[in-house]
């Protein structure tokens, strides 16, 4: 009896040990499949380019879930052009315990207050589209930026016009006076890309030998409706004079097209930047001479990849080749019909 009792005790002990080991292994596996919460604040959700990036971010989250078995929650908020609203959104993301934030700043010069909050909470941030000033970006090693090189955008845009002029000068100089008369639709006065795009697109035309003369220009804040109103006004003030419209983005180019169509004007060429979905359709239909595309899948993919790595305290994949360890520049190309 004693021998049987000892055998029974040993068997039970072994079984308990096996269960304990199995249980520990199960908990480790459960711990590996965690949830990733990402707070995303957009400067304005109705901006076509930003809306395109939002869609690509959502696709990235779905792919990441499939590949890594990690539940991803994207909490996307629209600041509607208000820096105060965006500041409140950042505070909310922190209170919810987000692992990382992706912020498209309303005001690039006002990022300091947001940075102060995330540094205190030790939550990494990937800024995109609107680059905070260098002093702010240098405050912490967990701040990143994803965007495009604005000068490159402008040079590529200008190249569209230069190439067309070299192929067929009369297609731009419709009245044959030896000069291409243009108007300029600019984005926000405080946006770094707007300032650089304006300067270098025109400089590229000059460097390329296109004889140009500026009629007028105005700030339309990236918006289609504002650009349409300005263009309508210019068509009335300068009838049969405008030959080229240089636009800092596609939405403003589309607004100018709206005004041109209402006025039933003809012989006006337009160029944009961003290659938004409606912008590409305008290129295909011949209403827009050309635009400049930043690879939106790559752009959003970089935002998400950096965010996911930072959230899990892992190094950013080397293939992203961050400049200074924090800046990622998305590639661009010319799109013409």
Image (tube, helix red, strand yellow):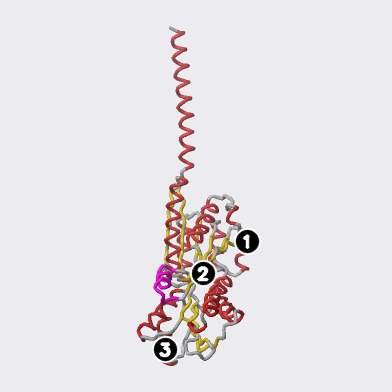
Mark 2 crowdedness (10 Å alpha carbons): few <14, some 14-19, many ≥20: some
Local packing at callout 1 (Cα closer than 10 Å; few below 14, some 14-19, many 20+) is: few
Q: What is the magenta segment's predominant secondary structure?
A: helix
Nearest to N terminus: mark 3 or mark 1: 3
What's the magenta region?
A: 276-288
**In this rendering, is residue 247 above or below 6?**
below
Which of 188 and 99 lies nearest the eye of the viewer? 188
Height in image: 94 above or below 85? above
- Position of residue 285 relative to residue 307, above or below, is below
Residue at the location (46% across, 32% down)?
23
Q: Which residue lies furthest to the top in this view?
A: 1
User: Camera-side residue: 175 or 323?
Assistant: 175
Instruction: Please check the rendered image and state whether residue 91 is part of the magenta-colored stretch, yes or no.
Output: no
Element type where label 2 sits in the image: strand
Q: Mark 3 points at which residue?
A: 235
Residue under numbered circle 1: 323
Residue 188: image location, x then y, percent: 50, 78
The label on residue 36 is none
From the image, tell me which residue sits under label 2. Answer: 334
């Amino acid at each position: 009896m004693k021998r049987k009792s000892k055998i029974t005790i040993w068997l039970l002990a072994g079984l308990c040990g096996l269960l304990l080991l199995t249980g520990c292994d199960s908990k480790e596996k459960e711990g590996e499949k965690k949830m990733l919460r990402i707070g995303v604040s957009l400067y304005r959700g109705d901006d076509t380019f930003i809306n395109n990036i939002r869609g690509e971010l959502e696709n990235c989250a779905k792919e990441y879930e499939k590949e890594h078995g990690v539940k991803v929650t994207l909490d996307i908020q629209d600041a509607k052009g208000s820096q105060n609203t965006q500041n409140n959104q950042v505070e909310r993301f922190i209170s919810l315990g987000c692992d990382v934030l992706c912020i498209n700043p309303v005001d690039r010069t006002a990022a300091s207050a947001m940075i102060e909050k995330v540094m205190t909470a030790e939550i990494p941030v990937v800024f995109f589209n609107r680059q905070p000033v260098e002093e702010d970006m240098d405050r912490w090693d967990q701040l990143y930026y994803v965007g495009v090189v604005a000068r490159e955008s402008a040079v590529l845009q200008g190249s569209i016009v230069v190439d067309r002029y070299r192929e067929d000068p009369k297609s731009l100089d419709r009245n044959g006076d030896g000069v291409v008369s243009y108007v300029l639709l600019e984005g926000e006065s405080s946006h770094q890309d707007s300032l650089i795009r304006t300067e270098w697109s025109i400089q590229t035309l000059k460097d390329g030998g296109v004889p140009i003369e500026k009629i007028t220009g105005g700030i339309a804040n990236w918006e289609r409706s504002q650009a349409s109103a300005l263009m309508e006004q210019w068509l009335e003030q300068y009838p049969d004079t405008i030959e080229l419209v240089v636009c800092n983005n596609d939405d403003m180019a589309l607004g100018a097209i709206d005004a041109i169509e209402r006025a039933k004007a003809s012989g006006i060429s337009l160029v944009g930047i961003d290659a938004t979905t409606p912008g590409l359709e305008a290129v295909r239909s011949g209403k827009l001479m050309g635009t400049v595309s930043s690879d939106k899948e790559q752009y959003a993919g970089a935002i998400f990849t950096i965010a996911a790595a930072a959230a899990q305290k892992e190094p950013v994949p080397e293939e992203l080749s961050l400049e200074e360890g924090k800046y990622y520049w998305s590639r661009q190309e010319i799109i013409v019909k």
